[in-house]
Image (tube, rainbow, N blue to C red):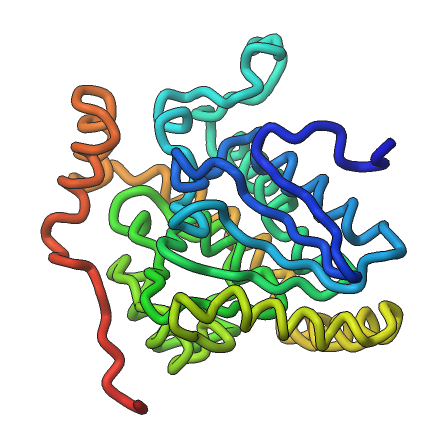
Amino acid sequence: MSKWLKSSECILFSVVEKVATITLNRPDKRNAISQVLLREFHEAMLEADDLVDVNVIVLEGAGRDFCAGFDLAGIYAGRSDEDSVKEPARYRSLIGNFDDDCFQMERQQEKLRIAFDVHKPVIAKVQGNCLAGGTDLALNCDMVIASDDARIGFPATRANGMPLNHLWFYLVGPQWAKRLLLSGDCVSGRDAAKIGLVLDSVPVDDLDATVAETARRLACIDSELLSANKRIVNLGMELAGARTLQRLDAEMDARAHLSQGPRRSRFKSDMANHGLKTALTQRDEPFGDGMVRVRRGS
């Protein structure tokens, strides 16, 4: 009996030669994050960290995309997957006051941040779209290897809020963090590698083999040594304020949700009256293809 992984609606889990592979398995929804997926992802990470025959963890998405972000239909309707098993009057609302929002964001952060917190190294394999909440999953991993044509960014900053886990500053520095988050524009996997948002990018046909070889090399090392080296780097980030910044990030996200500006109000209205597709089209139309082209390097 699995100690942590109790069910598997949205996650595939396998272990081969000391490498655990955790697959986000909602390809028909572009692996959008539901509360069920998030809970199972969290449990799968703990399971892999606990198993003595696992040294390395690979996180991937089934189908064409890594993860297109949170499942917005439920969020903007003010409900979660778990509402049916709760007594609503006894629990904080998803659309309550500022403190309720902070509480909800902090609980989400804990689950999204698990790849950073587990002892074993985690490699994110990113293809297709890695957007909004998908970047919260990927950027908490110890290494991100992307396909050259992957699309990585946080378009939700245009009308919805901000990243739930803010590691952008630590990965790309203040100017690129602002350039991407203030606009909601995306970068290709190739350009993400140029600015340090991901470790490396490769042609999409080489992605599986590249990640597998990287994982194989790490898996040759004793788990205790991998853990020690991962955690000292993470502690360096924490000494540079990374953990404190996440707490502030939850409060800033809750603050952003209070916006009554025209773009956020329009998005909420479009969601209510026309649905997600129209809301996203109206939100993103002024930005064209929404891509940043990085000119430096080759």
Compared with 188, 4 (above or below) is: above
Compared with 31, 200 (above or below) is: below
Which quarter of the figure has residue 74?
A: top left
At horizontal 52% and vertical 39% (from top left) the residue drawn is 25
Query: Considering depth in this image, is 34 or 200 the residue closer to the camera?
Result: 200
The number of discs equals 0
Q: Position of residue 19 (x, y in %)?
A: 73, 60
Q: Position of residue 76 (x, y in %)?
A: 35, 27
At horizontal 57% and vertical 56% (from top left) the residue drawn is 246
Q: Quadrant of the C terminus?
A: bottom left
Query: Considering depth in this image, is 220 or 123 the residue closer to the camera?
Result: 220
At horizontal 50% and vertical 69% (from top left) the residue drawn is 145
Residue 263 placement, left or right of 239: left
Residue that protrudes farthest toward the bottom in the picture: 297
Compared with 40, 249 (above or below) is: below
Residue 208 placement, left or right of 239: left
Residue 165 placement, left or right of 284: right
At horizontal 85% and vertical 68% (from top left) the residue drawn is 223
Q: Position of residue 31 (x, y in %)?
A: 45, 41
Compared with 225, 124 (above or below) is: above
Q: Position of residue 6 (x, y in %)?
A: 75, 29
Q: Quadrant of the N terminus?
A: top right
